[in-house]
Image (cartoon, grey):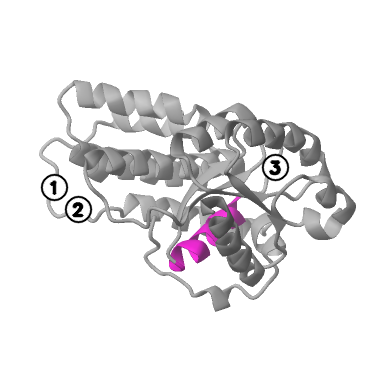
Amino acid sequence: MDSDQRQPAEAFPVPIGDVISRPLPEANLRRVAQEALMRVARLPGRRAPLPEPPAPAEIEALCTALATGSLEQARRIVDDHLARGRDKTWIAEGLLPEAARLMGRRWESDEVSFIEVGQAVGRLQRLLRLLRAEAGPRRPDPVRRAIFATPETETHTFGVIVAADAFRERGWEIDLSLSEPPDRLLADLTRSQVPLLGLSVSSRRSAPPLMQLLADLRTALPRLRVLLCGTILSTSPEVARQIPVDDRAADLPSAFEAADRLLLESLA
């Protein structure tokens, strides 16, 4: 998803572990979350009022599914609307942006948590991408694709959105999977067949479940390459070295280089 106000990679001089994983001040968290939500809310630009705008109950149902349910539940809501005769334009230009706006209002009034908003952003992005993929031919780079993910045990997720925008500025197509259960992340990777998984890890407690996830990934997706980032590289380097990934990156420039290198390996 494109940012309305993109920043070049040089605008992110701090280590990628700090960008991706450290707890941000609440004011910054709110700003990043609102910007991410509004990128969805403004995408695509509405050229004319919809003849039948979404009803409040329809908006609330999708918003709740995105925040506290799952991508599958949100997709079922969309499929139900399509079965009732609504088209994908109504979904993409009406229902999804209104759900993003409602999520922003709930965020401002503290009705949803940091994690719920982060998950909703990732699910909105993936839902919109699914709709675009089904709408017809696209012209994204079919190769430079990745999923950026935080383990289920992580609570600081908004920096991943910032890092994803930095990669998109360089031509990558990035989907987000934020604090989702391992089986759901595995299903997303299997369905999307992306060549690269970027893992942001801050806590050493995330290492044990990651070991099992990575073992399952090696069996199911042997060509997938995995890049590890996050503050675990500096705070628990001995633990980070035990996580069986293909490469590690402590800052954005090295992450860019590692991602390009791993992409070539996956295609070899």
Q: Where is residue 81 in the image (x, y as percent from the top left)?
A: 24, 25
Residue count near mark 3 (Cα–Cα under 10 Å), binned few <14, some 14–19, many ≥20: some
Q: Which mark is residue 233?
A: none
Residue 258 is drawn in which quadrant? bottom right
Residue 76 is drawn in which quadrant? top left
Residue marked by disc 2: 46
Name above or below for residue 94 compared with residue 267: above
Nearest to viewer (mark 1 / mark 2): 2
Q: Which amino acid does label 1 sit on?
A: Pro
Residue 215 is drawn in which quadrant? top right
Q: What residue type is labelled 3?
A: Glu
**Residue sitting at the far right:** 238
Image point 36% across, 44% down: which residue?
Answer: 129
Q: Does the magenta stretch include residue 162?
A: yes
Q: Magenta residues, as a range?
A: 157-170
**Residue sitting at the far bottom:** 10
Q: Position of residue 75 (x, y in %)?
A: 37, 28
Q: Distance from label 2 to label 3 (Cα)?
A: 36 Å
**Residue sitting at the far front:** 268
Residue marked by disc 3: 154
Residue marked by disc 1: 49
Mark closer to the chain start, 2 or 3: 2
